[in-house]
């Protein structure tokens, strides 16, 4: 289970970070809408992904040492 949470946390964090970077760059270039979604919505989705990654990695770090 810790390996699954570690993988999920890392993947969610990286995808969230890339989504935030894309939303930020799109906003700087003047794009406000993308495929019917506002760019701010994509930024919030990216933030949610990073938060999910942080929670998963926090669970891995705080797990008792004897727990498989």
Image (tube, grey):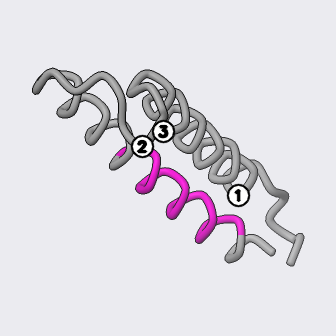
- Name which residue lies at 48% across and 38% down: 46
Q: Which residue is mark 2?
A: 35
For marks 3 and 1, the one nearer the N-term is 3
Q: Is 22 located above or below residue 4 in the figure?
A: above
User: Where does the image place residue 54, in percent across and percent down from the top left?
Assistant: 59, 42
Q: Which residue is mark 1?
A: 60
For marks 2 and 3, the one nearer the N-term is 2
- Name which residue lies at 15% across and 21% down: 30
**Quarter of the view holding residue 19:** top left
**Quarter of the view holding residue 7:** bottom right
Q: Residue 11 lies in magenta, yes or no?
A: yes
Q: Which residue is mark 3?
A: 46
Crowding around mark 3 (Cα neighbors within 10 Å: few <14, some 14 to 19, many 20+) is many
Q: Secondary structure at mark 1?
A: helix
User: Looking at the rendering, in which quadrant would you find the C terminus?
Assistant: bottom right
Q: Is 65 located above or below residue 68 in the figure?
A: above
Asked if residue 9 lies left or right of residue 36, the reply is right
Q: Nearer the viewer, mark 1 or mark 2?
A: 2
Disc 3, disc 1: CB below 8 Å? Answer: no
Viewer-proximal residue among 32 and 41: 32
Crowding around mark 1 (Cα neighbors within 10 Å: few <14, some 14 to 19, many 20+) is some
**Quarter of the view holding residue 58:** top right
Where are the magenta residues, as a range?
Answer: 5-17
User: Where does the image place residue 56, in percent across and percent down from the top left?
Assistant: 69, 52
Crowding around mark 2 (Cα neighbors within 10 Å: few <14, some 14 to 19, many 20+) is few
Disc 2 from disc 3: Cα separation: 16 Å
Q: Nearer the viewer, mark 3 or mark 1?
A: 3
Disc 3 from disc 1: Cα separation: 21 Å
């Amino acid at each position: 289970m810790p390996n699954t949470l570690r993988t999920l946390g890392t993947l969610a964090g990286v995808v969230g970070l890339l989504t935030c970077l894309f939303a930020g760059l799109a906003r700087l270039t003047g794009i406000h809408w993308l495929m019917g979604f506002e760019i701010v919505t994509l930024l919030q989705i990216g933030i949610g992904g990073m938060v999910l990654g942080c929670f998963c990695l926090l669970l891995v770090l705080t797990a008792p040492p004897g727990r498989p």
